[in-house]
Image (cartoon, rainbow, N blue to C red):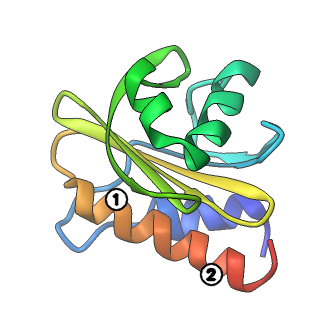
Amino acid sequence: MSWQAYIDDHLLATLPGGGQLTHAAILGQDGGLWASSPDFPEVSEDEVTAIMKGFDDAAALAATGLRIGGEKYMVVAGEPGEAIRGKKGPGGVTIKKTATALVFGIYDEGVTGSECNVVVENLGDYLKDQGI
């Protein structure tokens, strides 16, 4: 399966509540883009570095805010070394870390954080099981 198919067929699929993620992407842990939805925000090298550090020290990331494409999200939850969840207005973001990649899901009003968490983290867990 191509990386783009993971975006199109899994992350951008219609969710059980009827909504859909606004943006999704898979990036290498070095920040290289593997695949994305149209108009996914450009994630800077500094933002990727901060996100990677945030997996080890969520408090530091929470203090400065999670930034994706220059947009600031408030860190609301996560699992050390596994996932980071952020909120911005009625929307938010979930980032799942695999062995070599970062899986991003961004949502807006009409999608719940828990729906985003499930789809992003399930794909991330699958990729981890594949050694990716």
Q: Secondary structure at mark 1?
A: helix
The residue indicated by pointer 1 is: 116
Task: Tell me if residue 46 comes above or below residue 61 in the rendering.
Answer: above
Q: Secondary structure at mark 2?
A: helix
* Residue at 67% over, 66% down: 5
Q: Nearer the viewer, residue 2 or 34?
A: 34
In which image quadrant can residue 62 be found?
A: top left
Q: Is residue 21 left or right of residue 81?
A: left
For the N terminus, give its image quadrant: bottom right
The residue indicated by pointer 2 is: 126
Would you call the spot at circle 1 few (<14 residues within 10 Å), some (14-19), or many (20 or more)? many
* Residue at 63% over, 29% down: 50
Q: Nearer the viewer, residue 41 or 72?
A: 72
* Distance in Å between CA atoms under marks 2 and 1: 16 Å
Identify the residue at the far bottom of this view.
129
x and y, in percent, of residue 9 in the image: 55, 69
Would you call the spot at circle 2 few (<14 residues within 10 Å), some (14-19), or many (20 or more)? few
* Residue at 56% over, 40% down: 54
Amino acid type of disc 2? Answer: Tyr
Task: Tell me if residue 54 comes above or below residue 97 in the rendering.
Answer: above
